[in-house]
Image: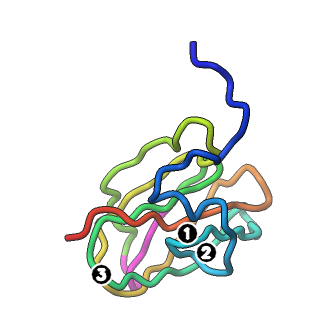
Amino acid sequence: MAAPCRTLDTTLPRPLAGWTRLGRTLDTGHAVTLAAGRGKAVTTSVRIRKAGIFGVAVDQDGWVDLYRGQGKALEMASESRGPACSTIRKIIRYRLRPGTYRVEVRQLKAPRVKLLLVAGERR
C-alpha cells in the first residue's frame, strides 16, 4: 500500500506546473476556477495556437466536452487520472487544430471547478 500524501500538488510534472497558479482564463500557464451555474455545469473557451494533443485537467469528476463551432462534441484522444498526491482528479485529452473551442464541464459535484489546459504532443 502506498504511503499517504503529506502534501498535495508539490511535485507535479512540468506540463501540470500551472495547476498551482490561478489565472482568469483556461490556459497552460495557470489554472482557472469557475463557478458552476444551474445544472452543475460550466462553459468557457480556449484558444489553441498550434496543433497538438491537449488535455483539460479537472479537480473533480464531471463530464468534459470540447466543441469547435456549433458542431458536435469532439472525440477524446484519452482519459487519465491525475498524478498521485495531487488535487487533479482527471485529465481528458483531445487532438486539436488551431482555433477557438468551447469547453463544457457538466455533472459537477462541487459549486466551483478548477481547470487547466495541459499542453501535450505537437502534431
Apparent side of residue 63 relative to residue 51 in the rendered image (left or right) = right
Q: Amino acid at mark 2?
A: Thr
Q: Name the spot of residue 40 as percent of width and height, x first.
A: 72, 61
The Cα–Cα distance between marks 3 and 2, rounded to whole angstroms, is: 22 Å
Could you say which quadrant of the image residue 17 lies in? bottom right
Apparent side of residue 112 relative to residue 70 in the rendered image (left or right) = right
Q: Are marks 3 and 2 in contact (CB under 8 Å)?
A: no
Q: Select label 3 or label 2 by which is in front.
A: 3
Of callouts 3 and 1, the N-terminal one: 3
Q: Under tag 1, what secondary structure?
A: strand
Apparent side of residue 68 relative to residue 13 in the rendered image (left or right) = left
Residue position for label 1 = 104
Q: Under tag 3, what secondary structure?
A: loop
User: Is the N terminus in the top left, top right, bottom left or bottom right quadrant?
Assistant: top right
* Residue 90 to residue 27: above or below: above
Residues drawn in magenta: 65-71
* Residue 81 to residue 103: above or below: above
Residue position for label 2 = 43
The Cα–Cα distance between marks 3 and 1, rounded to whole angstroms, is: 21 Å
User: Is the C terminus in the top left, top right, bottom left or bottom right quadrant?
Assistant: bottom left
Q: Under tag 2, what secondary structure?
A: strand
Residue position for label 3 = 50
Residue at the image position 80 percent from the left and 59 percent from the top: 111
Residue at the image position 76 percent from the left and 69 percent from the top: 35
Q: Name the spot of residue 54 as percent of width and height, x first.
A: 37, 65
Of callouts 3 and 2, the N-terminal one: 2
* Residue 62 to residue 116: above or below: above
Q: Name the spot of residue 89 as percent of width and height, x first.
A: 59, 45
Q: Is residue 67 magenta?
A: yes
